[in-house]
Amino acid sequence: MEKKVASFKEYEIFRADKSCLNEIANFVVRENYSHHLSSFTEEEISKDIKSVLEEEEYLYDEKSCIYIVRNYFGNMIGCIRSFHWDKHKTLPIEKVYGINPLHAVHEEEKYSYWHIGRFAVAKDSGLSTLTLFKRLMALAVKPIVEDKYSYMIAEIDSKLLKVMKVLGFGTRQIGKSIDYLTSETVPVCSSKRGINGFFSKYGDLCKAA
């Protein structure tokens, strides 16, 4: 089920649920391959789609915030996912990088953690990737901004990380980068203070036009 949260001239943003995870897995993997590789096989894509879908189904719960962007033909052209970690499930940052956020980020029990992931924008959408990123990221980090004791954890494409820094997003690298889903990906965390530099500038962009 999808609930519209914002409408703009060329697209709409919806909050979605578990029913869209298969579509998101397909979209994220195919866009990553399209953006970063010049040649690949359908077998490689299918393998990664299966892996991403299994991971998202495992992580999903009622507190998860999934946002998708659709053009007016109904096609997905962007997405992002924010997952409230219960401190028990194995996150991608632990499975892929061997990093336990409770040790690498903050050990006080009062803090909660949100894992941000699955950001992707259609390569051929004809729209501003930067604007879509600002809007989707603003929605994804809103729960962290609203919670006094929260941290963001994420694995972010190294090029996108540089863009985030320019936009005022303060992050701390908590491990070595690796190649993941076709690009160099960096494990990072960010406190509410680090996020506020970005959110104070662009938080209003996610509101309906």
Image (cartoon, rainbow, N blue to C red):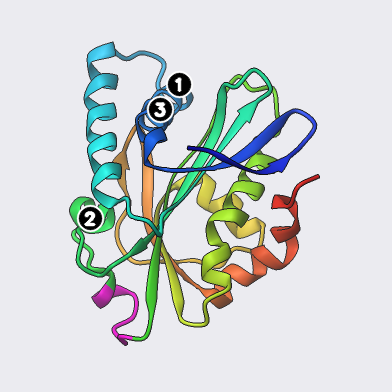
The amino acid type found where label 2 is placed reads: Tyr
Residue drawn at (81%, 44%) of the image: 209
> Gap in Å between the C-alphas at discs 2 and 1?
24 Å
Residue under label 3, please give it: 23
Q: Nearer the viewer, mark 3 or mark 1?
A: 3
Residue under label 2, please give it: 97
Magenta stretch?
102-109
**CB atoms of marks 3 and 1 within 8 Å:** no
Under circle 1, the secondary element is helix
Q: N-terminal of the two: label 2 or label 1? A: 1
Residue 194 percent location from the top left of the image: 56, 72
Does residue 34 appear to the left or right of 99 in the view shown? Answer: right
Residue 171 percent location from the top left of the image: 49, 66
Prevailing secondary structure class for the magenta stretch in the rendered image: loop
How many C-alpha atoms fall within 10 Å of the one at disc 2: few (<14), some, or many (≥20)?
some
The correct choice, above or below, for 192 with respect to 187 in the image is below
Residue 162 percent location from the top left of the image: 55, 52
How many C-alpha atoms fall within 10 Å of the one at disc 3: few (<14), some, or many (≥20)?
few
Residue farthest to the front?
1
The amino acid type found where label 3 is placed reads: Glu
Is 36 in front, or is 84?
84
Residue drawn at (61%, 29%) of the image: 70
Under circle 3, the secondary element is helix
Residue under label 1, please give it: 34
Does residue 162 appear to the left or right of 180 in the view shown? Answer: right
Q: N-terminal of the two: label 3 or label 2? A: 3
Under circle 2, the secondary element is helix
Q: N-terminal of the two: label 3 or label 1? A: 3
The correct choice, above or below, for 108 with respect to 194 in the image is below
